[in-house]
Amino acid sequence: MVRALDDVSLEIAAGSFVLLTGASGSGKTTLLALLGALERPTQGQVFLDGRNLSDLSGMELARVRRRFGFVFQNFSLIPGLPVWENITYPLIPRGISSRRRLETARSLLGNLGLEDRLSAWPKELSGGEQQRVAFARALVGRPEVLLADEPTSNLDPDSGRTLLKLLRNTHAEGTTVILASHDPQAVPLATQAFELEAGRLKTAPYSNS
Amino acid sequence: MRYFVEIARTGLTAVLLHPLRSVVTTACVVVLLLPFLVGLALSKGVEEDARDSIRFGADLYVSGDQFGRRVPVPLEAVNQIRKIDGVLEVTPRIVGSIVLGVENENAVLVGMPVERFPVAVTCVQGRLPQPGNRNELVVGTELARRLKLHVGDLLPPFYHNRKGDRISEVVGLFDSDVSLWQARLILTSFDAAAEIFDQPGLATDLLVECRSGYQESVTSTIQREIAFSQGPAKAVIRTRVTSREELQATLPAGVLHRGGIFNLHFVLAFAVGIPVVLVTSGLGLSERRREVGILKATGWQTDEVLLRGAVECFVLSLAAACIAILLAFVWLQWLNGYWIASLFLNGVDTAPALRVPFHLAPVPALLAFLLSFVLVMTGTLYSSWRAATVAPIEAMR
């Protein structure tokens, strides 16, 4: 068994912009998955508002995930669904009608400069556009915490800059953002940063604020 | 409610998300269901054909009874039964099996008074046997085709009679497509049949028609009063009376017996089918797993993922059942049960010359849908459940 994280202890305050840095394989994605309740820790504990996530049932964990928004490195869009469906799929279990979902997707895509891509298929979009669609999906449920795993690594510099700007705006609106990235352009945005090396926190966290 | 509707709607779109998997799964289920539906439809059709034959037959069938077995009845009984109050008509009949031609075709030879031939029997060529003329045969078109017989053809002696063998003549052909039971039938006069089987003075049974309401009293009178002694030992031949209702009651037993054997075979095919569908459901499994991971990562619960999968199964199985029913109808109606009828009906060719009886009843159709639902559910829901119960990040890899 690979020990992806070892002796990692950190606390993230609501409303902060956290940057996780570190080389590939250092454990950033694993830490993000644990923080976002996408995986249970084999050892240790993750607390959200004082509740230990390990104690929660599968259904409770699913409800916790509704408080989060995720942006994945590889976009993770469903290829067979049009853009608007991809964005609003998280709203379906909340019983929101397709008409309202369509309006929500239109509004989000308008803010992201993709209003004309509402009915396009993921394969028809560029990498930058796909990442913005994934970003819209992460925001659709009005998350309290936005987790982004190297969202700019597959993008050209312009698209990367656009996405970081979107993350900054989202943070400015009060959402907690946890970003795992190598991108040096992300550093000025962070209010807290942690560097990982071989699954351990390399340095003490620093704060921009 | 809207919650369920919205999730159910995603189940519908999920069918189109994986078109290859949907097509292959549906095709596998159709392949399994089609012979099942066709078999049941043929079985039902044969049963209905038999019921019709009984409905339009006589009120009572009288035969001899020895050692609890059915034996021929002496012709003296005809006049004795005619005298019973309430009896309208008594018709002696001989029914026997014969083998004809170099390929040993089995046929059923029925002999009865020419004037009592069934009304449904009309000659498409030639004529019916004339009273008094010996050894005139009327052959069904299906059997005539097999034996290459035409009106006017002479058949060499196919029986042995103590008084000497005689040549028989085909004087007419009747349409054997009317009923399955007429496919291998040869009709002749009662006297000719008695000569062919060398059983003078005997009939295999007597067809009795009664006045309305007299059936029971006639039955009890026959059973009580009519018996014969035969042979040097004066062995007693009692009479056995079978009513139309009794015949109808015994019919399902035979059909259900065959149906049971068929169902047993189908259960075996079904057992083989489950792994087949499991394998085909594995098409696009990694893509499906990743999709479930994305759903879970974005806040879907396991039960919601499974509901979506169940709706997808419902749609696929409904589609498979509808296609199977449609194909079964086409196979039986337009292709006349080509090949498959020969598996279910004894003596029917690969391309049946007679009109194959069938009835696609609603119950087997519903059963087909349930079976396909179980099959698809087994293949689909398990993989969805597996993907939904691991960590989302694991499923997305």
Image (cartoon, coloured by chain):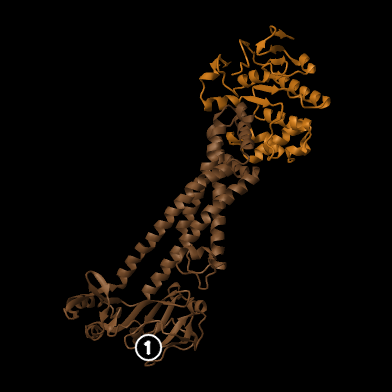
Chain colours: A orange, B brown
Q: Quadrant of residue A126?
A: top right
Q: Is residue B262 above or below residue B99?
A: above
In percent of the image, x 29 and y 85: which residue is there? B200
Residue position for label 1? B115
- Few, some or many residues within 10 Å of mark 1 (<14, 14–19, 20+): few
Please name the amino acid that badge 1 sits on. Glu
Q: Quadrant of residue B278?
A: top right
Which residue appears farthest toward the right when viewing the image?
A158
Q: Is residue A26 above or below residue A83?
A: above
In the image, taking residue B103 as reference, residue A160 lies left or right, namely right
In percent of the image, x 42 and y 70: which residue is there? B49
Residue B223 rendering spot, x and y as whole percentages = 20, 75
Residue B219 rendering spot, x and y as whole percentages = 23, 75
- Name the foreground residue: A69 vs B82: B82
Residue A119 rendering spot, x and y as whole percentages = 73, 41
Question: Where, quadrant-wise, is the N terminus of chain A in this rendering?
Answer: top right
Question: Where, quadrant-wise, is the C terminus of chain A in this rendering?
Answer: top right
Residue B118 rendering spot, x and y as whole percentages = 40, 82
In the image, taking residue B147 as reference, residue A29 lies left or right, namely right
Q: Is residue B128 above or below residue A197?
A: below
Look at the image and tell me whether residue B1 can be seen. Answer: no
Q: Quadrant of residue B293?
A: top right
- Name the foreground residue: B225 vs B290: B225
In percent of the image, x 44 and y 64: which residue is there? B44
Q: Secondary structure at mark 1?
A: helix
Q: Chain of mark 1?
A: B
